[in-house]
Image (cartoon, rainbow, N blue to C red):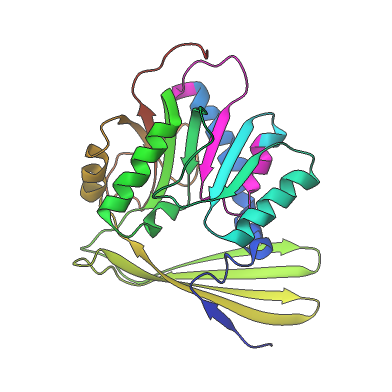
């Protein structure tokens, strides 16, 4: 086995392997986005206009573009942006991908989206309340009236916060990736939890390890509600979880750990103009 690589961005610097870890979610997430827009979104006369903050490797950009939707996305990591751009081009799909940050991103002039989505706790990288508020306000500003923001993140129970471990396994011909993510007990005063992801990559008979270390900001249900109150243009319509089951709505509480918020901007404005 070759030497390990360790950094704050290791698995993001390896888009192919990162993409393999999450590939099994793509169909579920795509169906959820389309389904929740049919149930909760504004009336449409054409394809969805979609913005994905922190789009990563572009797997959802590709999936939605292949289904005829207009897709835009951005990510902070230059390797992920380049990978996403290449995958759209390789499939002959249209889409716009650029490098930007959640807290202060900008979108193409005059574009307003039907749906903005940010899944798998990426929002928790924002380490201050002020930054989180700025990001939500920018997402809201990017939506048309009646448009939906779909925001997914893990909740924290400060009274019961043991170390947690999750494993994903991804495969392609000649490549196997085993990804183990460990979260440490929450630090309530600092509102942080230390995270570690270790990817064990076996390719062409050789195995190596890439390890990523970072801190997430924590959110209890009460802290999440308090954050949402600071962005009154967004109204909470429903909660789901990371099973992406349209028929199963949840409450915003600690009965489960992974919440997917469905938020609407203002009032729907009827048919798209």
**In the image, 158: left or right of 102?**
left
Q: Which residue lies furthest to the front in this view?
A: 109
Q: Which residue is drawn at 56% across and 60% down?
A: 77
Q: Which residue is drawn at 47% across and 42% down?
A: 106
Magenta run includes residue 54: yes
Image location (x, y in percent) of residue 260: 41, 42
Q: Can residue 100 be seen in this view?
A: yes
Q: Is residue 260 above or below residue 246?
A: below
Image location (x, y in percent) of residue 65: 68, 35
Image location (x, y in percent) of residue 78: 60, 60
Quadrant location, the N terminus: bottom right
In the image shown, does 218 or 178 lie closer to the viewer?
Answer: 218
In the image shown, does 204 or 81 lie closer to the viewer?
Answer: 81
**In the image, 192: left or right of 70?**
left
In the image shown, does 15 or 174 lie closer to the viewer?
Answer: 15
Q: Residue at x 47, y 19 (%)?
A: 42
Q: Is residue 249 visible?
A: no
Q: What stretch is highlighted in magenta?
A: 39-64
Res 184 quadrant in image: bottom left
Magenta run includes residue 207: no
């Amino acid at each position: 086995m070759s030497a390990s690589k360790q950094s704050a961005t290791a698995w993001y610097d390896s888009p192919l392997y990162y993409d393999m870890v999450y590939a099994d979610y793509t169909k579920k997430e795509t169906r959820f986005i389309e389904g929740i827009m049919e149930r909760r979104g504004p009336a449409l006369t054409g394809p969805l206009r979609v913005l994905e903050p922190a789009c990563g490797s572009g797997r959802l950009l590709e999936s939605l573009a292949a289904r005829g939707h207009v897709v835009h996305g951005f990510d902070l990591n230059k390797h992920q942006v380049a990978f996403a751009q290449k995958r759209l081009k390789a499939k002959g799909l249209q889409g716009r991908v650029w490098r930007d940050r959640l807290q202060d991103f900008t979108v193409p002039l005059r574009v307003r989206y039907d749906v903005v989505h940010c899944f798998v706790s990426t929002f928790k990288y924002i380490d201050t309340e002020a930054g989180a508020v700025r990001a939500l306000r920018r997402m809201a500003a990017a939506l048309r009236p009646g448009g939906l923001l779909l925001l997914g993140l893990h909740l924290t129970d400060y009274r019961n916060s043991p170390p947690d471990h999750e494993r994903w396994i991804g495969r392609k011909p000649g490549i196997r990736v085993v990804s183990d993510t460990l979260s440490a007990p929450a630090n309530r005063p600092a509102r942080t939890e230390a995270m570690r992801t270790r990817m064990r990559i076996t390719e062409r008979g050789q195995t190596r390890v890439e390890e990523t270390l970072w801190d997430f900001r924590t959110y209890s249900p009460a802290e999440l509600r308090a954050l949402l109150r600071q962005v009154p243009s967004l109204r909470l319509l429903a909660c789901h979880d990371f099973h992406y089951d349209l028929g199963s709505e949840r409450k915003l509480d600690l009965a489960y750990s992974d919440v997917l918020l469905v938020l609407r901007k203002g009032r729907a404005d009827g048919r798209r103009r």
